[in-house]
Amino acid sequence: MSQNTPYILDMKAGNYAWCACGLSKKQPFCDGSHGPTNMRPILVHIEEDKKVAWCGCKASNKGPFCDGTHKNIKG
Ligand code: FES
């Protein structure tokens, strides 16, 4: 987990690599920190400029996107 709330960002259309391991210093995006782990970023294509709620807790059932699961995480 990098934070237990989503990163709500105004995104431009394009391709993004969402950090799945939680180690990146450029949350919510991959910076290569997953290195020795067997985790890899999830590649996301955003089709149009829009606001996106990226999952920060890394427990969402919708992968890169917040689905409210963070509300069940204590601590
Ligand atoms: S931040 Fe992970 S489900 Fe909301």
Image (cartoon, rainbow, N blue to C red):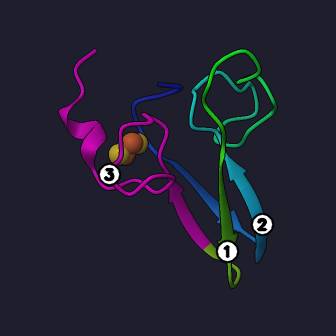
Give the amino acid type for the residue marked by disc 1 in the picture: Ile
Q: Amino acid at mark 2?
A: Asn
The numbered mark at residue 15 is 2
Q: Mark 3 or mark 2: which comes first in sequence?
A: 2
Q: Distance of mark 3 from mark 2, alpha carbons?
A: 21 Å
Label 2 SS: strand
Give the residue drawn at x 81%, y 33%: 31
Residue found at the far front of this picture: 38
Does residue 12 show up magenta in the picture? no
* Residue at point 57%, 37% (across, down): 20
The response on whether ligand 1 sits within 8 Å of label 3 is yes
Q: From the viewer's perspective, is 62 left or right of 11?
A: left
- Looking at the rendered structure, the secondary structure element under dot 1 is strand
N-term mark: 1 or 3:
1
> Between 42 and 25, which is closer to the camera in this rendering?
42
Cβ atoms under marks 2 and 1 closer than 8 Å: yes
Q: Is mark 2 within 8 Å of ligand 1?
A: no
Range of magenta residues: 51-75
Q: Which mark is residue 61?
A: 3
